Image: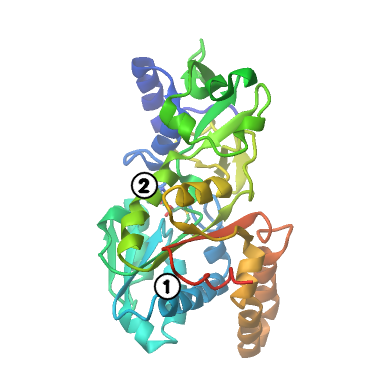
Amino acid sequence: MPQTQTKLSARLKAYIRETGPLPVSEYMSLCLLDPKDGFYPTRDPLGSEGDFITAPEISQMFGEVLGLWVIQSWMDMGRPKRFTLAELGPGRGIMMADMLRSIALDADCMRAVRVYLIEASAALEAVQGQSLAQAAAPVTWVKSITDLADDPTLIIGNEFLDCLPIRQAVQMDPFAGKDGWQERLIGLNDTGQFRFQLNTAPLSPTLQAMLPSGHEDARKDELIELCPSVFQIMEQIKPLFTAHPGRALFIDYGPDSTEFGDSLQALKRHKKIGVFDLPGESDLTARVDFSACRHAARSIDLTASEIITQAEFLSKLGIEMRAVTLTRHKPDAKPKVLRQLHRLMDHDEMGQLFKALCISASGMAAPLGFRS
Ligand code: SAH
Protein backbone atom coordinates (compact mmCIF):
# COMPACT_ATOMS: atom_id res chain seq x y z
CA MET A 1 0.00 0.00 0.00
CA PRO A 2 1.45 3.43 -0.90
CA GLN A 3 1.48 6.35 1.51
CA THR A 4 -2.04 7.75 1.36
CA GLN A 5 -3.08 11.29 2.13
CA THR A 6 -5.14 11.44 5.32
CA LYS A 7 -6.46 14.42 7.27
CA LEU A 8 -3.64 13.97 9.71
CA SER A 9 -0.84 13.41 7.20
CA ALA A 10 -1.18 16.88 5.69
CA ARG A 11 -0.91 18.46 9.14
CA LEU A 12 2.00 16.18 10.15
CA LYS A 13 3.94 17.12 7.03
CA ALA A 14 3.38 20.84 7.59
CA TYR A 15 4.55 20.36 11.17
CA ILE A 16 7.71 18.52 10.07
CA ARG A 17 8.48 21.24 7.49
CA GLU A 18 8.14 23.84 10.21
CA THR A 19 9.95 22.19 13.12
CA GLY A 20 12.15 19.50 11.56
CA PRO A 21 12.07 15.69 11.81
CA LEU A 22 10.08 14.14 14.67
CA PRO A 23 11.03 11.42 17.13
CA VAL A 24 9.05 8.24 16.41
CA SER A 25 7.27 8.80 19.74
CA GLU A 26 5.83 12.10 18.61
CA TYR A 27 4.61 10.64 15.31
CA MET A 28 3.08 7.73 17.20
CA SER A 29 1.26 9.89 19.77
CA LEU A 30 -0.14 12.24 17.14
CA CYS A 31 -1.30 9.34 14.95
CA LEU A 32 -2.94 7.57 17.89
CA LEU A 33 -4.22 10.38 20.05
CA ASP A 34 -4.52 13.66 18.13
CA PRO A 35 -7.93 14.86 19.43
CA LYS A 36 -9.17 15.90 15.95
CA ASP A 37 -7.72 13.36 13.54
CA GLY A 38 -6.04 10.67 15.69
CA PHE A 39 -6.86 6.97 15.48
CA TYR A 40 -8.44 6.40 18.91
CA PRO A 41 -10.36 9.68 19.39
CA THR A 42 -12.14 9.37 16.03
CA ARG A 43 -13.43 5.78 16.16
CA ASP A 44 -14.08 2.57 18.08
CA PRO A 45 -11.34 0.40 16.56
CA LEU A 46 -11.94 -2.79 18.53
CA GLY A 47 -13.62 -6.06 17.65
CA SER A 48 -14.05 -8.19 14.57
CA GLU A 49 -15.57 -5.28 12.60
CA GLY A 50 -12.77 -2.94 13.67
CA ASP A 51 -9.02 -2.93 13.16
CA PHE A 52 -7.83 -5.32 15.85
CA ILE A 53 -9.16 -7.63 18.53
CA THR A 54 -7.99 -8.08 22.10
CA ALA A 55 -8.30 -10.82 24.74
CA PRO A 56 -11.36 -9.37 26.56
CA GLU A 57 -13.07 -8.98 23.17
CA ILE A 58 -12.34 -12.63 22.37
CA SER A 59 -13.83 -14.04 25.53
CA GLN A 60 -15.60 -13.04 28.74
CA MET A 61 -13.44 -15.64 30.51
CA PHE A 62 -10.43 -13.32 30.34
CA GLY A 63 -12.00 -10.55 32.44
CA GLU A 64 -13.75 -13.04 34.67
CA VAL A 65 -10.56 -14.73 35.85
CA LEU A 66 -8.89 -11.34 36.24
CA GLY A 67 -11.78 -10.48 38.58
CA LEU A 68 -10.68 -13.39 40.75
CA TRP A 69 -7.15 -11.97 40.68
CA VAL A 70 -8.62 -8.69 41.97
CA ILE A 71 -10.40 -10.43 44.86
CA GLN A 72 -7.22 -12.25 45.88
CA SER A 73 -5.15 -9.05 45.59
CA TRP A 74 -7.69 -7.19 47.72
CA MET A 75 -7.27 -9.94 50.35
CA ASP A 76 -3.48 -9.63 50.06
CA MET A 77 -3.82 -5.87 50.65
CA GLY A 78 -5.53 -6.67 53.99
CA ARG A 79 -9.16 -6.41 52.84
CA PRO A 80 -9.35 -2.60 52.96
CA LYS A 81 -12.87 -1.11 53.35
CA ARG A 82 -12.23 0.99 50.25
CA PHE A 83 -9.81 0.44 47.39
CA THR A 84 -9.17 1.69 43.87
CA LEU A 85 -9.41 -0.57 40.85
CA ALA A 86 -7.96 1.46 38.00
CA GLU A 87 -7.81 0.38 34.38
CA LEU A 88 -5.42 1.96 31.91
CA GLY A 89 -6.79 2.15 28.36
CA PRO A 90 -10.07 0.28 29.00
CA GLY A 91 -11.09 0.03 25.32
CA ARG A 92 -14.81 -0.75 25.24
CA GLY A 93 -15.05 -1.34 29.00
CA ILE A 94 -15.85 -5.02 28.48
CA MET A 95 -13.01 -6.35 30.60
CA MET A 96 -14.03 -4.16 33.54
CA ALA A 97 -17.67 -5.31 33.24
CA ASP A 98 -16.51 -8.97 33.17
CA MET A 99 -14.19 -8.41 36.14
CA LEU A 100 -16.95 -6.78 38.19
CA ARG A 101 -19.19 -9.79 37.62
CA SER A 102 -16.57 -12.00 39.28
CA ILE A 103 -15.76 -9.47 41.99
CA ALA A 104 -19.45 -9.64 42.97
CA LEU A 105 -18.75 -13.20 44.18
CA ASP A 106 -17.25 -11.55 47.28
CA ALA A 107 -19.75 -9.07 48.70
CA ASP A 108 -17.18 -7.31 50.92
CA CYS A 109 -14.77 -6.82 48.04
CA MET A 110 -17.62 -5.55 45.87
CA ARG A 111 -18.64 -3.02 48.52
CA ALA A 112 -15.04 -1.82 48.80
CA VAL A 113 -14.20 -1.36 45.11
CA ARG A 114 -14.06 2.09 43.45
CA VAL A 115 -13.49 1.86 39.71
CA TYR A 116 -11.34 4.43 37.93
CA LEU A 117 -10.83 4.47 34.17
CA ILE A 118 -7.94 6.26 32.49
CA GLU A 119 -8.80 6.70 28.83
CA ALA A 120 -7.36 9.13 26.30
CA SER A 121 -10.14 8.80 23.71
CA ALA A 122 -13.47 10.57 24.22
CA ALA A 123 -15.10 8.19 21.72
CA LEU A 124 -14.07 5.12 23.72
CA GLU A 125 -14.94 6.80 27.01
CA ALA A 126 -18.53 7.05 25.74
CA VAL A 127 -18.56 3.33 24.85
CA GLN A 128 -17.14 2.48 28.30
CA GLY A 129 -19.97 4.49 29.87
CA GLN A 130 -22.49 2.28 28.07
CA SER A 131 -20.73 -1.00 28.96
CA LEU A 132 -20.58 0.01 32.61
CA ALA A 133 -23.97 1.70 32.90
CA GLN A 134 -25.24 -1.13 35.14
CA ALA A 135 -22.02 -1.49 37.16
CA ALA A 136 -22.65 -2.11 40.83
CA ALA A 137 -19.65 0.03 41.80
CA PRO A 138 -18.91 3.74 41.40
CA VAL A 139 -17.07 4.44 38.13
CA THR A 140 -15.00 7.60 37.65
CA TRP A 141 -12.92 8.70 34.64
CA VAL A 142 -9.64 10.44 35.40
CA LYS A 143 -6.87 11.74 33.16
CA SER A 144 -3.87 10.19 34.85
CA ILE A 145 -2.58 7.88 37.58
CA THR A 146 -1.75 11.01 39.57
CA ASP A 147 -5.50 11.79 39.79
CA LEU A 148 -6.35 8.51 41.55
CA ALA A 149 -7.69 8.51 45.12
CA ASP A 150 -5.21 8.16 47.95
CA ASP A 151 -6.25 4.56 48.73
CA PRO A 152 -4.91 1.02 48.35
CA THR A 153 -4.76 0.58 44.58
CA LEU A 154 -4.88 -2.12 41.95
CA ILE A 155 -4.04 -1.05 38.41
CA ILE A 156 -4.61 -3.20 35.34
CA GLY A 157 -3.57 -2.51 31.75
CA ASN A 158 -4.29 -4.99 28.97
CA GLU A 159 -2.81 -4.04 25.61
CA PHE A 160 -2.09 -0.61 27.00
CA LEU A 161 1.72 -0.58 27.07
CA ASP A 162 1.95 -1.50 23.38
CA CYS A 163 0.37 1.78 22.32
CA LEU A 164 2.63 3.96 24.43
CA PRO A 165 4.93 6.00 22.18
CA ILE A 166 8.42 4.59 21.66
CA ARG A 167 11.64 6.19 20.56
CA GLN A 168 14.10 4.36 18.35
CA ALA A 169 17.90 4.54 18.21
CA VAL A 170 20.49 2.90 15.97
CA GLN A 171 23.99 1.89 17.07
CA MET A 172 26.27 3.57 14.53
CA ASP A 173 29.58 3.08 16.32
CA PRO A 174 29.79 0.20 18.80
CA PHE A 175 33.27 1.34 19.88
CA ALA A 176 31.76 4.59 21.15
CA GLY A 177 29.44 2.70 23.53
CA LYS A 178 26.42 4.78 24.58
CA ASP A 179 27.61 7.69 22.44
CA GLY A 180 27.37 5.47 19.36
CA TRP A 181 23.56 5.47 19.53
CA GLN A 182 21.76 7.94 17.27
CA GLU A 183 18.04 8.58 17.29
CA ARG A 184 15.96 7.44 14.32
CA LEU A 185 13.60 10.27 13.39
CA ILE A 186 10.76 10.73 10.93
CA GLY A 187 11.29 13.36 8.24
CA LEU A 188 10.27 13.93 4.61
CA ASN A 189 12.02 12.98 1.36
CA ASP A 190 12.36 15.16 -1.74
CA THR A 191 8.87 14.29 -2.93
CA GLY A 192 7.32 15.07 0.43
CA GLN A 193 6.82 11.46 1.54
CA PHE A 194 7.50 10.35 5.12
CA ARG A 195 10.84 8.63 5.62
CA PHE A 196 13.12 7.56 8.48
CA GLN A 197 16.37 9.44 8.98
CA LEU A 198 19.05 9.48 11.63
CA ASN A 199 19.79 12.35 13.94
CA THR A 200 23.51 12.91 13.59
CA ALA A 201 23.97 13.98 17.22
CA PRO A 202 24.38 11.25 19.86
CA LEU A 203 21.40 10.32 22.02
CA SER A 204 20.69 12.77 24.85
CA PRO A 205 21.95 11.72 28.33
CA THR A 206 18.32 11.26 29.49
CA LEU A 207 17.64 8.78 26.68
CA GLN A 208 21.03 7.12 27.14
CA ALA A 209 20.05 6.45 30.77
CA MET A 210 16.95 4.59 29.52
CA LEU A 211 18.88 2.15 27.31
CA PRO A 212 17.87 -1.31 28.53
CA SER A 213 20.45 -3.79 29.71
CA GLY A 214 21.80 -5.77 26.80
CA HIS A 215 22.26 -2.64 24.66
CA GLU A 216 26.03 -3.11 25.10
CA ASP A 217 25.84 -6.17 22.83
CA ALA A 218 24.52 -4.23 19.84
CA ARG A 219 26.46 -4.47 16.63
CA LYS A 220 26.66 -1.68 14.07
CA ASP A 221 23.26 -0.73 12.58
CA GLU A 222 21.32 -2.56 15.25
CA LEU A 223 18.13 -0.76 16.35
CA ILE A 224 16.79 -0.47 19.88
CA GLU A 225 13.45 0.84 21.17
CA LEU A 226 12.93 2.90 24.31
CA CYS A 227 9.66 3.72 26.01
CA PRO A 228 10.05 6.82 28.23
CA SER A 229 6.35 6.67 29.22
CA VAL A 230 6.94 3.42 31.09
CA PHE A 231 9.44 5.19 33.34
CA GLN A 232 6.88 7.95 33.87
CA ILE A 233 4.15 5.46 34.79
CA MET A 234 6.40 3.79 37.36
CA GLU A 235 7.20 7.21 38.85
CA GLN A 236 3.47 7.93 39.10
CA ILE A 237 2.75 4.58 40.75
CA LYS A 238 5.56 4.92 43.28
CA PRO A 239 3.97 7.42 45.75
CA LEU A 240 0.67 5.47 45.75
CA PHE A 241 2.47 2.22 46.48
CA THR A 242 4.61 3.88 49.14
CA ALA A 243 1.57 5.15 51.04
CA HIS A 244 -0.57 2.01 50.61
CA PRO A 245 -0.40 -1.60 49.50
CA GLY A 246 -0.94 -1.94 45.77
CA ARG A 247 -0.29 -3.80 42.55
CA ALA A 248 -0.12 -2.98 38.86
CA LEU A 249 -0.69 -5.78 36.38
CA PHE A 250 0.31 -5.44 32.74
CA ILE A 251 -0.56 -7.90 29.99
CA ASP A 252 0.71 -7.33 26.49
CA TYR A 253 2.64 -8.74 23.57
CA GLY A 254 6.41 -8.77 23.72
CA PRO A 255 9.49 -10.83 24.56
CA ASP A 256 10.75 -11.47 28.09
CA SER A 257 14.19 -10.06 27.33
CA THR A 258 15.17 -7.01 25.29
CA GLU A 259 15.33 -7.68 21.57
CA PHE A 260 16.92 -5.51 18.93
CA GLY A 261 15.03 -4.50 15.81
CA ASP A 262 12.21 -2.26 14.63
CA SER A 263 8.87 -3.49 15.95
CA LEU A 264 6.68 -0.50 15.11
CA GLN A 265 3.69 -1.84 13.22
CA ALA A 266 0.46 -0.54 11.74
CA LEU A 267 -2.80 -2.49 11.54
CA LYS A 268 -5.86 -1.68 9.46
CA ARG A 269 -8.84 -4.03 9.52
CA HIS A 270 -6.73 -6.84 11.01
CA LYS A 271 -4.05 -6.51 8.29
CA LYS A 272 -0.51 -5.21 8.62
CA ILE A 273 0.25 -2.12 6.52
CA GLY A 274 3.22 0.28 6.39
CA VAL A 275 3.56 2.64 9.35
CA PHE A 276 3.36 5.66 7.01
CA ASP A 277 0.50 4.38 4.85
CA LEU A 278 -2.51 5.71 6.75
CA PRO A 279 -1.46 8.11 9.55
CA GLY A 280 -4.30 8.56 12.05
CA GLU A 281 -6.42 5.88 10.39
CA SER A 282 -4.46 2.77 11.32
CA ASP A 283 -3.46 1.40 14.71
CA LEU A 284 0.21 1.79 15.61
CA THR A 285 1.85 -0.38 18.27
CA ALA A 286 5.28 -1.64 19.27
CA ARG A 287 6.16 -4.81 21.14
CA VAL A 288 6.56 -4.29 24.87
CA ASP A 289 10.05 -4.68 26.30
CA PHE A 290 9.01 -6.34 29.56
CA SER A 291 12.51 -6.61 30.93
CA ALA A 292 12.92 -2.83 30.47
CA CYS A 293 9.59 -2.30 32.33
CA ARG A 294 10.84 -4.47 35.13
CA HIS A 295 14.08 -2.53 35.23
CA ALA A 296 12.17 0.80 35.32
CA ALA A 297 10.18 -0.46 38.33
CA ARG A 298 13.14 -1.87 40.21
CA SER A 299 15.24 1.24 39.64
CA ILE A 300 12.82 3.10 41.95
CA ASP A 301 12.46 0.23 44.46
CA LEU A 302 9.15 -1.16 43.33
CA THR A 303 8.88 -4.95 43.42
CA ALA A 304 8.60 -6.60 40.01
CA SER A 305 7.37 -10.16 39.43
CA GLU A 306 8.81 -12.66 36.99
CA ILE A 307 7.65 -12.18 33.41
CA ILE A 308 5.34 -15.09 32.57
CA THR A 309 3.35 -16.07 29.51
CA GLN A 310 -0.33 -15.27 29.22
CA ALA A 311 -1.01 -19.02 28.98
CA GLU A 312 0.70 -19.72 32.29
CA PHE A 313 -0.93 -16.75 34.00
CA LEU A 314 -4.49 -17.50 32.86
CA SER A 315 -4.07 -21.18 33.58
CA LYS A 316 -3.01 -20.42 37.16
CA LEU A 317 -6.08 -18.20 37.50
CA GLY A 318 -8.23 -21.20 36.53
CA ILE A 319 -9.38 -20.27 33.04
CA GLU A 320 -9.73 -23.92 31.96
CA MET A 321 -12.04 -24.57 34.89
CA ARG A 322 -14.07 -21.51 33.98
CA ALA A 323 -14.41 -22.87 30.44
CA VAL A 324 -15.67 -26.20 31.78
CA THR A 325 -18.27 -24.44 33.94
CA LEU A 326 -19.45 -22.31 31.04
CA THR A 327 -19.88 -25.30 28.75
CA ARG A 328 -21.65 -27.28 31.47
CA HIS A 329 -24.25 -24.53 31.72
CA LYS A 330 -24.58 -24.16 27.95
CA PRO A 331 -23.50 -27.33 26.12
CA ASP A 332 -24.34 -25.75 22.74
CA ALA A 333 -21.70 -23.11 23.36
CA LYS A 334 -18.93 -25.68 23.84
CA PRO A 335 -17.27 -25.35 20.41
CA LYS A 336 -17.29 -21.56 20.74
CA VAL A 337 -15.84 -21.57 24.27
CA LEU A 338 -13.12 -24.02 23.25
CA ARG A 339 -12.24 -21.87 20.25
CA GLN A 340 -11.94 -18.83 22.52
CA LEU A 341 -9.79 -20.75 24.98
CA HIS A 342 -7.54 -21.88 22.15
CA ARG A 343 -7.04 -18.28 20.97
CA LEU A 344 -6.13 -17.03 24.42
CA MET A 345 -3.97 -19.96 25.47
CA ASP A 346 -2.32 -21.76 22.58
CA HIS A 347 1.35 -21.22 21.93
CA ASP A 348 0.75 -20.42 18.29
CA GLU A 349 -1.99 -17.94 19.19
CA MET A 350 -1.75 -15.44 22.11
CA GLY A 351 -0.59 -17.84 24.83
CA GLN A 352 3.14 -17.52 24.30
CA LEU A 353 3.56 -14.14 22.61
CA PHE A 354 1.62 -12.31 25.31
CA LYS A 355 3.21 -11.90 28.73
CA ALA A 356 2.12 -10.78 32.18
CA LEU A 357 4.13 -8.66 34.60
CA CYS A 358 3.06 -7.49 38.04
CA ILE A 359 4.57 -4.52 39.88
CA SER A 360 3.87 -4.43 43.62
CA ALA A 361 4.35 -2.23 46.63
CA SER A 362 7.18 -3.67 48.67
CA GLY A 363 6.25 -6.13 51.39
CA MET A 364 3.31 -7.68 49.57
CA ALA A 365 2.95 -11.41 48.98
CA ALA A 366 3.72 -12.75 45.52
CA PRO A 367 0.62 -12.09 43.40
CA LEU A 368 -1.81 -14.82 42.40
CA GLY A 369 -0.81 -16.33 39.07
CA PHE A 370 2.87 -15.61 39.67
CA ARG A 371 3.25 -17.86 42.72
CA SER A 372 5.20 -21.00 42.02
N1 SAH B 1 -7.61 -2.68 27.17
C1 SAH B 1 -8.54 -2.75 26.07
C2 SAH B 1 -8.20 -1.81 24.92
C3 SAH B 1 -6.82 -1.92 24.33
S1 SAH B 1 -6.57 -0.73 23.04
C4 SAH B 1 -8.65 -4.17 25.58
O1 SAH B 1 -7.83 -5.00 25.97
O2 SAH B 1 -9.56 -4.47 24.81
C5 SAH B 1 -5.70 0.55 23.84
C6 SAH B 1 -6.55 1.42 24.73
O3 SAH B 1 -5.70 2.38 25.36
C7 SAH B 1 -7.63 2.22 24.06
O4 SAH B 1 -8.72 2.32 24.93
C8 SAH B 1 -6.93 3.59 23.85
O5 SAH B 1 -7.83 4.63 23.60
C9 SAH B 1 -6.20 3.72 25.14
N2 SAH B 1 -5.03 4.59 25.17
C10 SAH B 1 -4.02 4.65 24.30
N3 SAH B 1 -3.06 5.50 24.72
C11 SAH B 1 -3.50 5.99 25.91
C12 SAH B 1 -2.96 6.92 26.85
N4 SAH B 1 -1.78 7.51 26.65
N5 SAH B 1 -3.67 7.17 27.97
C13 SAH B 1 -4.87 6.57 28.19
N6 SAH B 1 -5.42 5.69 27.32
C14 SAH B 1 -4.76 5.41 26.20
Sequence-earlier tag: 2 or 1:
2
Q: Secondary structure at mark 1?
A: helix
Residue 182 in the image: above or below residue 28: above
For label 2, the residue is: 41
Q: Is mark 2 within 8 Å of ligand 1?
A: yes
Q: Residue furthest right?
A: 348
Q: How is the image coloured?
A: rainbow
| Quadrant in the picture for residue 214 | top right
x and y percentages locating residue 4 in the rendered image:
51, 28
* Residue shown at 49% from the left, 72% from the top: 365
x and y percentages locating residue 312 in the rendered image:
66, 67
x and y percentages locating residue 88 in the rendered image:
40, 57
Residue 331 in the image: above or below residue 285: below
Q: Amino acid at mark 1?
A: Ala
For label 1, the residue is: 97
Task: Assess disc 2: are there few (<14), some (14-19) or many (≥20) residues with their C-alpha within 10 Å of its C-alpha.
Answer: many
Task: Assess disc 1: are there few (<14), some (14-19) or many (≥20) residues with their C-alpha within 10 Å of its C-alpha.
Answer: many
* Residue shown at 48% from the left, 29% from the top: 208
Q: Nearer the viewer, residue 44 or 209?
A: 209
Q: Secondary structure at mark 2?
A: loop
Q: Is residue 125 left or right of residue 221?
A: left
| Quadrant in the picture for residue 371 | bottom right
The image's mark for residue 246 is none
* Residue shown at 60% from the left, 57% from the top: 307
Query: Which quarter of the image is occupied by the C terminus?
Result: bottom right
Specify whether residue 6 is in view.
no
Q: Amino acid at mark 2?
A: Pro
Q: Give how far apart the Cα atoms at labels 2 and 1 are.
A: 22 Å
x and y percentages locating residue 118 in the rendered image:
34, 57
Point out the frontmost of discs 2 and 1. Answer: 1
Q: Is residue 371 left or right of residue 280?
A: right
